[in-house]
């Protein structure tokens, strides 16, 4: 039996095979490279005032940035030599985050709201559904109208057709028909989109 302090051996008297040490992949940094991360020997430098200094040694550019109390940031890495600018990297990242947040805030996701109707709907119920539909259009959403027939109502489909024509006429000023009425089993589906 092998001792706890020396190398452990298999039953065959050989050392066990060690697995190769697989280090996790280096974390890739998002955003532009800065200061010592810039690998090129020469860069094209633009200083904090916007003055183009032309092609310059990277070491000299980093020293200039540190003297100005700022960072050297790689703006255009695909150029030859890459274009770098002296700027406050913290402020740059903060303003980029603010712009991205503003863009996300302005984005409107169009939702499809559904309104269910019956062929023999009462006038007051119809008015309530129409007000809801108008609110959806004002918010920029599409509306899917589902008209369901039950039992013997299938024999009088003209009532449902008249109702859908009335809906089209009532919303004509603030909505357009995106998908005309079509049967899906026992129900008729129509999609309206805001103008």
Image: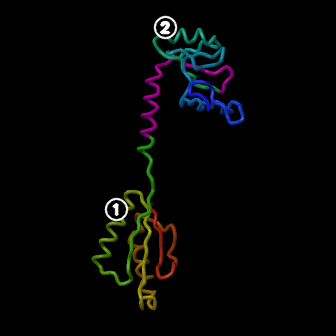
Q: Nearer the viewer, residue 58 or 190?
A: 58
Q: Nearer the viewer, residue 118 or 37?
A: 37
Q: Residue at x 69, y 30 (%)?
A: 15
Percent of width and height locating residue 169: 41, 73
Question: According to the image, label 2 marks what residue?
Answer: 67
Residue 157 tag number:
none
Q: Nearer the viewer, residue 13 or 68?
A: 13
Question: According to the image, label 1 marks what residue?
Answer: 135
Name the element at disc 2: helix
Q: Earlier in the sequence, mark 2 or mark 1?
A: 2
Q: Label 1 crowding class (10 Å Cα cut-off): few <14, some 14-19, many 20+?
A: few
Question: Answer yes or no: do the residues labelled 2 and 1 have beta carbons within 8 Å?
Answer: no
Q: Is residue 5 left or right of residue 113?
A: right
Name the element at disc 1: helix
Q: Residue at x 60, y 24 (%)?
A: 6
Highlighted magenta segment, given as a residue range = 78-102
Q: Is residue 170 left or right of residue 30?
A: left
Closer to us: mark 2 or mark 1?
2
State how far apart marks 2 and 1 are (Cα).
59 Å
The quadrant holding residue 145 is bottom left
| Residue at the limit of the structure toward the left, as seen here | 124
Q: Quadrant of the N terminus?
A: top right
Percent of width and height locating residue 10: 67, 35
Q: Residue at x 46, y 67 (%)?
A: 192
Q: Count the marks: how many?
A: 2
Q: Is residue 184 magenta?
A: no
Q: Label 2 crowding class (10 Å Cα cut-off): few <14, some 14-19, many 20+?
A: few
Specify the color scheme. rainbow
Q: Is residue 170 left or right of residue 50?
A: left
Percent of width and height locating residue 24: 59, 32
């Amino acid at each position: 039996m092998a001792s706890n302090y020396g190398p452990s051996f298999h039953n065959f008297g050989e050392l066990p095979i060690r697995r190769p040490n697989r280090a996790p992949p280096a974390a890739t940094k998002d955003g532009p490279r800065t200061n010592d991360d810039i690998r090129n020997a020469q860069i094209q430098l633009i200083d904090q005032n916007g003055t183009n200094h032309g092609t310059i040694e990277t070491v000299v550019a980093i020293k200039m940035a540190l003297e100005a109390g700022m960072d050297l940031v790689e703006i255009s890495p695909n150029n030859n030599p890459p274009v770098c600018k002296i700027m406050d990297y913290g402020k740059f990242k903060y303003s980029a985050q603010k712009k991205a947040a503003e863009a996300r805030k302005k984005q409107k996701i169009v939702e499809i709201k559904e309104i269910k109707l019956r062929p023999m709907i009462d006038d007051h119920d119809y008015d309530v559904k129409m007000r809801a539909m108008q609110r959806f259009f004002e918010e920029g959403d599409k509306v899917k109208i589902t008209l369901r027939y039950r039992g013997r109502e299938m024999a009088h489909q003209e009532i449902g057709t008249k109702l859908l024509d009335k809906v089209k006429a009532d919303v004509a000023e603030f909505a357009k028909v995106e998908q005309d009425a079509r049967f899906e089993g026992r129900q008729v589906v129509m999609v309206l989109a805001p103008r």
